Amino acid sequence: GQQVMQIPQYQHVQEGEDFTTYCNSSTTLSNIQWYKQRPGGHPVFLIQLVKSGEVKKQKRLTFQFGEAKKNSSLHITATQTTDVGTYFCAGRKDTNAGKSTFGDGTTLTVKP
Amino acid sequence: GAGVSQTPSNKVTEKGKYVELRCDPISGHTALYWYRQSLGQGPEFLIYFQGTGAADDSGLPNDRFFAVRPEGSVSTLKIQRTERGDSAVYLCASSRANQETQYFGPGTRLLVL
């Protein structure tokens, strides 16, 4: 079945440093979503990417969808302590599918 | 407006017992999803409803798991003959329509002793 892998599993950075997490799917995706989950919380939707090669920005966050629609990345510029949490990508295989397959996330810790 | 709510927030049960977990989606959302999340892992898809019907139940691990959404709003996830391996956080999400943003509830933490 479809697999979604994320690397790294953990990332510890000094406040102000940049952070990147990578997501790779075993199959071509129709779209990919990114979520953030704070410790003890539930996943909160950040963004959805649909088009091949798409790049979207939200303040210090930059999201990319690969040309082949099998990989994606999330880059945070100048991390802040509020960025702490686990970042998940989730891919949908089919255009009409409701099912999303989640990666196991990258947990970011930020040292002030 | 109100978000997705789930009850109970915590459930402790004994091996072999039956449990029901409830999800109240955002009003007007036609799509509803159940996921299971174990510590250190991402949410694992269980089942997806479009309206009252289960459009995709391919993630249900076995026939001990069943979910309903009789009126196209509230959904109940039912687990029979619980096993210790069923212990996890059960997350519910809803979206206005298929392929749109999923809004997650706070989850039900199930512990099977």
Image (cartoon, coloured by chain):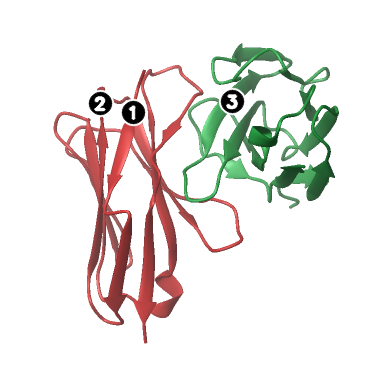
Can you tell which quarter of the image residue B6 is in? Answer: top right
Dot 3: element: strand
> Label 3: how many residues lie within 10 Å, few (<14), some (14-19) or many (20+)?
many
Q: Is residue B40 left or right of residue B22?
A: left
Report which residue position mark 1 lands on.
Answer: A3
Three-letter code, disc 2: Ser
Q: Are marks 1 and 3 on the same chain?
A: no
The x, y position of residue A1, in whole percent, is 36, 18
* Whether residue A100 can be seen here: yes
* Whether residue B73 can be seen here: no
Can you tell which quarter of the image residue B90 is in? Answer: top right
Report the Cα–Cα distance between label 3 and label 2.
20 Å
Q: Are marks 2 and 1 on the same chain?
A: yes
Please name the residue shown 68% across and 32% down the image.
Answer: B29
Report the Cα–Cα distance between label 1 and label 3.
15 Å
Please name the residue shown 41% across and 70% down the image.
Answer: A83
The x, y position of residue B7, in whole percent, is 82, 44
> In this view of the protein, which residue sits in the foreground, B52 or A14?
A14
Can you tell which quarter of the image residue B53 is in? Answer: top right
> In this view of the protein, which residue sits in the foreground, A28 or B102?
A28
Q: Which mark is residue B46?
A: 3
Report which residue position mark 2 lands on.
Answer: A26
Determine the colour of chain B.
green
Dot 2: element: loop
Callout 3: residue from which chain? B
> In this view of the protein, which residue sits in the foreground, B99 or B58?
B58
Callout 1: residue from which chain? A
Three-letter code, disc 3: Leu
> Label 1: how many residues lie within 10 Å, few (<14), some (14-19) or many (20+)?
few
Dot 1: element: loop
The quadrant in which the C terminus of chain A is found is bottom left
